[in-house]
Image: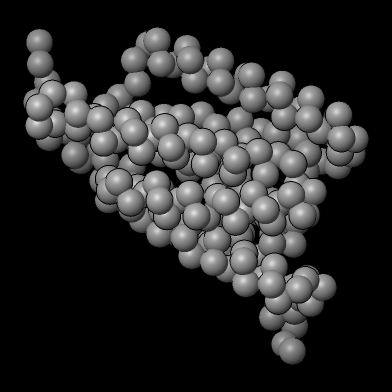
Amino acid sequence: MSPIFDFFFGQYSEYSTFYISLEIIAVIFGILSVFFARANSIWVYPTGMISTLIYVYLLLQWALLGDMMINAYYFIMSVYGWYVWTRKVDDTITTPISRTTAKEKRIQLIIFVATLVFVYSVYIAFDKWNDWTAYVDTLTTAIFFVGMWLMARRKIENWIFWIIGDIISVPLYFYKGFTFSSFQYLLFTIIAIFGYLSWKKSLDKIPVTA
């Protein structure tokens, strides 16, 4: 094998074909989910739920508790988001794209801080707070928790949290040895940027009411 191939994928020599196949399937459905999110399509949720369920299983096997909790939370929020996105605010219009209110900003701050405390507590309880990645993992978990909550409520600011979290996750997952997932987050970053621009364009078309 070439040195470049070994650098990116050498760690997979220790993984079973079953785990590698599951990770690739999870990545594919994860990418599909973000594409559907960019298109403001309800299919973001069923595709995302398949990806998150697979990751919950894999991350549990790999003892990555923070990452596992992120995906378990994604699954729960996907059910909630699916409901919100299909709920009609009147006889014809479903929940539209909007910006966060002052109240929602306070809620997202509470979610962020509460997640930091919760994930830290879990790491301490399982004696996993023994590496610098635990700090980063706790931070990204809090960022993604807020981002998922905002996306479920169809708030444009969700993309900002996704972009920040994705950028941090690219080197983090590569360092952990999950090259496919690292590439996935790199692609997520690019899609999230375009997702924000697409949602902003749609939001700017909505007339401002007095």
State how many labels appear: 0
Compared with 10, 133 (above or below) is above
Give the residue displayed 86% in from the left and 29% down from the top.
125
Q: Residue at x 48, y 49 (%)?
A: 49
x%, y% of residue 206?
A: 12, 30
What percent of the width, then of the height, locates residue 199? 26, 40
Q: Is residue 190 visible?
A: no
Image location (x, y in percent) of residue 56: 64, 49
- In front of the other: 146 or 57: 57
Q: Is residue 79 visible?
A: yes
In the rendered structure, the answer to whether residue 87 lies left or right of residue 79 reads: left
- Quadrant assignment for the C terminus: top left
188 or 33, nearer to the observer: 33
Chosen colour scheme = one colour
**Residue 160's x, y, as percent?**
43, 36
Question: Which residue lies at the image location 79% right of the left edge and 77% below the top edge?
Answer: 13
Q: What residue sits 78% from the left and 30% below the top?
A: 122
Q: Answer with left or right where residue 179 lies relative to residue 33.
A: right
- In what quadrant of the picture does the N terminus appear? bottom right
Picture quadrant of residue 155: top left
From the viewer's perspective, is 131 left or right of 172? right
Foreground of the two, 65 or 108: 65
